[in-house]
Amino acid sequence: MEITIRVNGEQVVRDVEPRLLLTHFLRDELRLTGTHWGCDTTNCGACVVRLDGVPVKSCTVLAVMADGAAVDTVEGLAHGAELDPLQEGFVTCHGLQCGFCTPGMLMTGRALLDRDPDPSPQTIREAISGQVCRCTGYENIVRSVRWAAEKEASKEEVTP
Amino acid sequence: MTSIDDSRIAGVQDPSAQIHAAPETPRGYGSMKRKEDARFVRGRGQYVDDVVLPGMLHGAVLRSPLAHARIVSIDTSAAEAHPKVHAVITGETLAGLGLAWMPTLSYDTQAVLATDKVRFQGQEVAFVVADDKYSARDALALIDVEYEPLAPVIDAKTALDAGAPVVRDDKEGKADNHIFDWESGDSAATDKVFAEAEAADDQVVVTADVLYPRVHPAPLETCGALADMDPVTGKLTLWTTTQAPHAHRTLYAMVAGLPEHKIRVVSPDIGGGFGNKVGIYPGYVCAIVASIVTGKPIKWMEDRSENLMSTSFARDYHMRGEVAVTKDGRIRAVRVDVLADHGAFNATAQPTKFPAGFFGVFTGSYDLEAAHCAVTGVYTNKASGGVAYACSFRITEAVYLVERMVDIVAHDLEMDPAELRMKNLLHADQFPYQSATGWVYDSGDYPRTLQVALDKAGYRELRAEQAERRRRHEAGERVDLLGIGLSFFTEAVGAGPRREMDILGLGMADGADLRVHPTGKAVLGISVQTQGQGHETTFAQIVAAELGMSPDDIEVVHGDTDLTPFGLGTYGSRSTPVSGAATAIVARKVRERARIVAAAMLEVSPDDLEWNDGSWQVAGDPEASKTIAEIALAAHSSLELPEGVEGHLDASCVYNPPNLTYPCGAYVAVVDVDPRTGTVNVRRFIAVDDCGVRINPMIVEGQVHGGLADGVGMALMQGIAFDLDGNCLGGSMMDYLLPTSLECPSWELGETVTPSPHHPIGAKGVGESATVGSPPAIVNAVVDALAPYGVRHADMPLTPAAVWSAAQGRPLRTDLAIT
């Protein structure tokens, strides 16, 4: 089947098998390997990308279901050389160790901040509760998202 | 050393109060941002599955649906006829190459692909190679295997019964499921103390049966490999998920007969290891064989169920603990009997002389008169067990047992568990301390560490709140019960002295190479390998501190056997104790070499120089000084070099540790338990760790955080049970529950620092401390909460069902599903 998807702002057209998972489409067809695969059962969240802005687990979305949609992956998060404040937050607050869950956490975190710029620690915990991190014990991920929220708030104060 | 910033601890209830500025890059030790993070946050890490080679094909493994069955026949013809299939490999194919079986890390053998029988559910039976991974999976369904089912051995407690089915009838003359008997300590002296305690009016013997259930490390990245055998050069390059690339290279050379210089093992970015990636799995061997057979690169990545069902498990220790103790709480002796379920193949990852790992430290942090343990290993029809799941070679089991037993003693004697521990802990002036089982603890100040934790927790206030809750509960009010659980652990990490410790004959030393380029920038090659521990940063900091450089000017290379020195790899919290020591020493070698060159530059004797503030200075003349960068350039210049110095500063080192390092810690778990539903909420967790000198405190804290989450998981959720047919009941993340952000509290950390006296920079390992120390604290807390119900012990995982059943006086057996 031919599908057209806007991936990180760029339109791509591909002919794919109907059973191809979105995560494999991104990783194998487009070589966007920042999106990971970890469980197959929608439990771990290593594969989270944004589908029309909504964080989804791309291991349980068929590529053909994304036809006509916009998909955003971790590769599109930075603005050129400038990191997204959330990426900066993860580096600053040691929000990652092995890095495998990180892209999914970043995509969920970004979606959270886009709809709630000042989330409480508990709100952050709820937002990432469908994703597993085996390294950090989550505390520093919560701090990282808070760091980004504060940074973005302070930027908005100086920009009228 | 940098101490923990108290404001960060005080602010844990409100992380917004903890937002801290980005740490500055220090010249040596101290928190700094990790060098590796730049690629990870951009999605630019390179894990095994991200590596793609031209012409690459994909492998998939057919697995047994049965736990124990004879293979009658395997028909691969339909799979071979699939248009996208290139090869189907069976045990018979491998037998023709002498590769149907491979050695394990414990001098046993393991089937690569089954030939005679399948011995656990999920065992590897055939390997298909196809154009893409979907087609490879399609072809698995086309393979027809006829099995003759056999009665399985599932309950370890029946494995040695007369007439039990024999799992390993492949071993000549094997007529039972016994693997080994191992003991440690002085049996006669221990029995004598127990006999006295039984006879004396003022002493008691406390006994309990304690299970550490089977768990799986479940790193987020599963295991896999990409094998590329170049048919022209005969060189095999293997990208693979390994925590020990050098050891794997040597083992492939030994097993497959490939010349070792023609094997390059690359362990790129690894998505967590936790011990899961120490061993060699059949899929890796199949990928190599398939690459040789097809002449193409072969990628094999297991899926999550394959990972959870077939790669090595951990724990599975059925323990009986006995404590001889005076009625006023002085612990005299500990006696332990263990039944160890090793699954179908003894693939336990332990040093050769330690079939039960370092379980011998079960005497814990206490000053005992005598101790003895006996461990019996058995085969069952389960995947192989005994891998180190962040357990420091079975210290997890040892610490869990002794800390559970101490709480049970406190329960039976009606003593406060904190008071009982204080009464028995080793004191600072007893170090170095030789334990009753012969381990020489290097340093510690246990009472102080425990006191810091109790103070931080507000122990007395918590006990007061607990009493109030119990009063309300007894008055019939619907209220959660409060539980307070302590644990005090001593770990023995950094294996190890090569005379005592080897894996398959390879001494457990580690290397470091340091090259200083002419402009003064350096490349450090290390034999250990990061799976998230931050070696690229921490090890650069060690060199920076020794040579007066910025860590930014030091590139750390690891995980590629063609580029790094030999060593046994990263597991058992050994990177900093062993390779970290090698790194400090190699930097000191460079510094000494630089001294000779600096003397020539300054036209003085090397003896006239002193190392000061990152440069060699003429004593009494600080103006006359040379930095490492200046000296490196001179070493490569036309300067006439003194005798004995070649035109560089480079050096290498292999470090053979004189002893293990012994980190310790005091943990306090605070839980709310609803006895009506069995639900447990971890309200607070206070962890005070002493891992000696901290190189990068931010990274150390991160290591502790992760281990604490592991403890929540193992104590409350994780646990893989089997039904009596041998079906694995934890084969996906829907069944095997890992802790999420909602089960984990906001961790409260503290520290004490007693440097290791024998480590070059006073550091101790820390990677597994929290995984070792936290499960007993949580279980102790839950059991403490259930005191009004008369609960004395309940086995992990303390799921709502297990907690509720314990409160009803009917504790569950958590390793088996018996219906």
Image: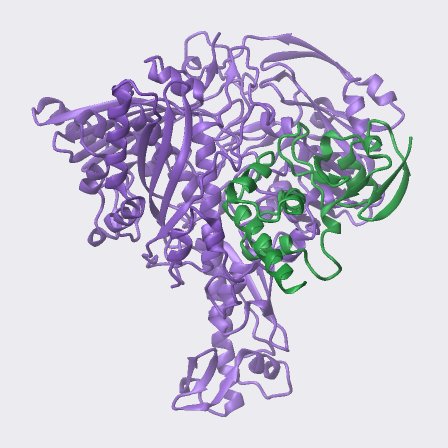
Chain colours: A green, B purple
User: Which of the two residues, B489 or B101, is positioned nearer the viewer here?
Assistant: B489
Q: Residue furthest left?
A: B201
Residue B673 sits in quarter: top left
Q: Nearer the viewer, residue B118 or B50?
A: B50
Q: Residue B521 vs residue B211: left or right? A: right
When asked about the image quadrant of residue B111, the answer is top right
Residue B569's x, y, as percent? 54, 48
How many numbered discs, if any? 0
Q: Position of residue B570 (x, y in %)?
A: 52, 47
Q: Is residue B662 above or below residue B389?
A: below
Quarter of the image with the N terminus of chain B is bottom left
Q: Is residue B37 left or right of residue B777?
A: right
Q: Is residue B183 visible?
A: no
Q: Is residue B440 visible?
A: yes
Q: Position of residue B417 (x, y in %)?
A: 23, 35
- In-image side of B335 versus A106 (left or right): left
Query: Horizontal and vertical percent for residue B26?
Result: 50, 68
Q: Nearer the viewer, residue B572 or B17?
A: B17
Please determine whether, in this image, residue B329 is positioned above or below residue B797.
below
- Residue at the front extreme of this rendering: A160
Q: Quadrant of residue A40?
A: top right
